[in-house]
Image: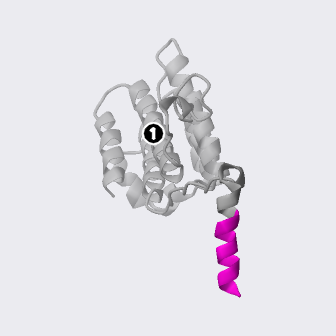
Amino acid sequence: MEITDKFWNRLHLELDKESDRSLVIVAAALLDEALKKCVEKRMLPAKKKELCVFSGGNSPLSTFSSRINFCYQIGIISSALQRDLHIIRKLRNDFAHDPFDLSFEDNSVKNRISELDSVSNYKETNPEARSNIGPPGTRNDFIFAVSWRLYSITESLNEISSGKEHIPEFGYFDHGELMKYFGVLIGSEQ
């Protein structure tokens, strides 16, 4: 629960800020970082920084999009959450790249946030949880949508098992020693 609290507290620090832009960008960054933590827990640590899948220009998992897809493909998140995280990623891109002040009042933003509710019925089946976020409105709907998804991802860290290093392949062993070893094992079974 400690990591969930860390992410939750950071998200709610953003709620006090006035900028819609900062809320969306930080919310997406928190989701992105939570996915990274999930992948890190599943994977072995990199032996060298330049071999890490998260760092460097050609890193396969350096983007939010690649982490979303990877987490789905290794079974950390569902296809529904994959879809919704891509919607949030697109919202982040909209806010980050629009040279004008985009807000939760813009129709394009409202439409994307409505998309988040189109697959999930969590808002309808848990109106009390939604009302705890604040009064009706697109900004609070976004906060609610991100909150329960972020909670779900960070809590899944408790269920992810870490990877185990593979034993060296046969070609890395001294064949004479290997045969002695297997000879001992085979002899002991007789």
Image quarter where the N terminus lies is bottom left
When the figure is inspected, residue 182 is found, relative to residue 147, above or below; the finding is: below
Residue 164 or 34: which is nearer the viewer?
A: 164
Image quarter where the C terminus lies is bottom right
Q: Quadrant of residue 34?
A: top left
Residue type at the position of mark 1: Glu
Q: Is residue 112 visible?
A: no
Q: Is residue 151 left or right of residue 189?
A: left
Residue 11 in the magenta stretch? The answer is no
Q: Residue 68 at what x, y percent from top left?
A: 60, 42
Q: Is residue 170 left or right of residue 81?
A: right
Residue 180 in the magenta stretch? The answer is yes
> Is the residue marked by circle 1 packed among few (<14), some (14-19), or many (20+) residues within 10 Å?
some
When the figure is inspected, residue 74 is found, relative to residue 97, above or below; the finding is: below
Name, please, the residue furthest toward the top: 99
What residue appears at the point 37 percent right and 53 percent down from the top-left corner?
A: 131
**Residue topped by disc 1:** 33
When the figure is inspected, residue 48 is found, relative to residue 8, above or below; the finding is: above
Q: Quadrant of residue 18?
A: top left
What residue appears at the point 48 percent right and 44 percent down from the top-left corner?
A: 45
* Tag 1 secondary structure: helix
Magenta stretch in the rendered image: 179-190
